[in-house]
Each structure stands twice: as structure tokens, then as C-alpha cells.
Image (cartoon, rainbow, N blue to C red):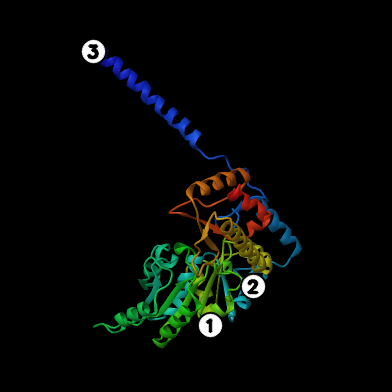
Amino acid sequence: MDRRAFLQGSLASVAAAALPFEAAAQAAQAAPPAFPPVDAHTVWLIGDDALPDPVAMSARLATLAQRHPDVRDRYQEQGAVAELERAFAALLGKEDCAFLPTGTLANNVAVRILCGEHRRALVQQESHFYRDESDAAQRLSGINLVPLAAGRAAPTLAEVRDAIDASESGPYPLKIGAVSLESPVRRVDGELVPLARVREIAALARAHGARLHLDGARLLLAPPEFDITAYAAEFDTVYVSIYKYLGAPFGAVLAGSRADIAEARELRHVYGGALYQGWMPALLALDALPGFRRDIAQAHARVRELIARLVAAGKARDRSVADHSNIYWLEMEQALAERAFTRGREAGIRIGRWQDGRIPVYANTTILRRPLDEYAALFLG
């Protein structure tokens, strides 16, 4: 064997073996400070709520079950499930409401009912229904989804009119059975579809015999001046999540007319969503619901005051969209945002990362856990 080749190969092997250790050392040096253990003092300025805590959730559920001995249901009949359904029907101004295990199921059941025999529906291209539900409407119900408003929250009235005309005026006319709107749209900065636009679309759709569904998974996160009941009134069916910010481990509600919700309960079983016991998520959400709108209103006020302080100090510009839900945007220098991110990690306060000149600030109830001065200090030093 060539000694020189052998030595070169051996040295190369040693160097290669050392590379992972070197890379690990460099990564450790560049890594941000460790986030403290999550507890009741932890704050998320990004996201819709605190991360689920299985121990705390279990303890809270046990306490609530002891206080309310008649919570049990049987296949979503009676108990806490029925009480939750009544509460959401009243909140959304609808005749009836059904509990379902997931929002995906709620969307698919609703649009299937609204379409009836006219298996074509208009949707936003950036919506959960179109992009995150594995073509369930097409695969399970034979509904053809026509996407509108690529890269935007809301389709224009002209887009909706053109889509209806193209469908109904072609050589083989097809009626649009339903229009599904997600609002707020998480993929588009959490933007809400304006009520005026909803009303225009609703009037046009109904003139052509189509019905309307609202994917309002995060509807309750809207600012305090937002009229939930008036908004929901424009839709035949409305879905709201109960796990994203109401403390439940899973679940959704679908509200509408008595006839539509009776059909929704039947389809819930057909789709395999009739759980034997649904009282656990229902009880947790039912407990959180009465005070939630008050708390989220306070959270919005806290975020707005924080933004006002940073703008007044010349450290940021408010770049929130006009029809935002609970996501506000701050334009600031990257160095300032990164210092705030690091301070936040050390203090147990999660902050969104700087990207394209701005950072998001979410209004959620965890912001109420600490004084406003602590959040301002992250940015102002």
C-alpha cells in the first residue's frame, strides 16, 4: 500500500469525523438562549393561545366535572355537548348548532348540505377548505371546488360574478351550489373578509340560488368592535373551532337552521364523526366561553397600547392590515427585532421572528399575564 495515500486517507477520515463535533459546537454557540420552562407566567406574542398543557388541562377538567355532575352525553346528545350547542347557537344567532370532532369535518358536512344536488362550490384559494383538507370535498362528496382570490383574503364581487357566469353560461351549464368563505384567513395575515364584501357576495350568490358557508374557525379572535352575530347572519352555516383558543383538546361547532343542522348530525355519523363521548372538550370550551370575548378584547387593547408606545418611541411603524383579526404587524429594524426576540426567550415571552422588515404581534389572552411595561422593555431596552 502507498504510505502517503494511506496517511492522507487516515487524516481525511479523522477530519471528517471531527466535522460533526465542530458543527455542533458552532451551532451551540449560535443557538439562542434556552426558553424557560413553560408555566402559567409564560406569554406567547405569536399564536392564538398558550400551548396545551396536558396536566393542567386534566386537572381543570376533573374540577369542572366535579362541579357539574350531569355533563355526560351519549353520542353528543344531552349533557355538556347540548349546553355548548345552545350557547353557540345563541352567540351566532342561529336556530341550532351541532358539535363535531374537527373543523375539517364541519366544513365538509356544511358545504355538502348547502350544495345539495349542485355539486360545485366557490372557495378562496388560500382557504383551509381548499388547501388543507386533502380534496375531501371532491373525494367524499363529488363537489368541484372553484378557487378564487389567489394570494388574497377575499375575492372581489367581479371575480365571484365571473365564476358564476363561467359555470352557468357555458356549453354545459352547471349551477353553483355554495360559496364557502374563510374569515379570518390565516394564510393572509389573519385578514377578515369585510362585512360589506360578504353582503355583496351573499346577495349575488343567493340571486343565483347558491347558499353560503363561513369557515369562522378563529372568528372569536376578531377585535372587540367586530359584530359576530351580524357577520354570521349573512351565512347559512357557520363553523367555529373550540380548541384553538377555548382550552379544549379538540372539537368544533357548526351552526345553522334546524333543518340543516339535523342533516349535519346525520352526516356526522355517516362520516364517522359520532363520538360516543364528547363531554370532555365541550365542558372545557363551555367554561371558557362566557369570559372569552371580554378577555380577548382586553388582549387587543394591550397589543394596541404596546404598538402605540413603540411607534411613539420611533422604534416601529404599525403595518397591520385594515381588516385584521388578532394579528398585528410591526415594521422595524432587524437588529431591534432580534434583540427583542432574544430578550423574550430569556424572559419566557415568545415573539415572532423578523421577516421582510416586519414582525407579527398576536392578540391572545396570554398577553394579560404580565404588565405592559415588560413587553415594551423587550423592544425599548
Q: Quadrant of residue 171?
A: bottom left
- Residue 177 seen in the current view: yes
* Disc sitting over residue 2 in the figure: 3
Identify the element where label 1 is drawn. helix
Counting from the top left corner in percent of width and height, residue 372 is at 66, 56
Identify the element where label 2 is drawn. helix
* Disc sitting over residue 259 in the figure: 1
Q: Which amino acid is tagged 1?
A: Ala
Counting from the top left corner in percent of width and height, residue 193 is at 47, 73
For this orientation, the residue located farthest to the right is 67
Q: Which amino acid is tagged 3?
A: Asp
Q: Is residue 273 above or below residue 6?
A: below
Q: How many marks?
A: 3
Counting from the top left corner in percent of width and height, residue 366 is at 63, 56
Name the residue that disc number 2 marks: 82
Q: Earlier in the sequence, mark 1 or mark 2?
A: 2
Q: Earlier in the sequence, mark 3 or mark 1?
A: 3
Q: Which amino acid is tagged 2?
A: Ala
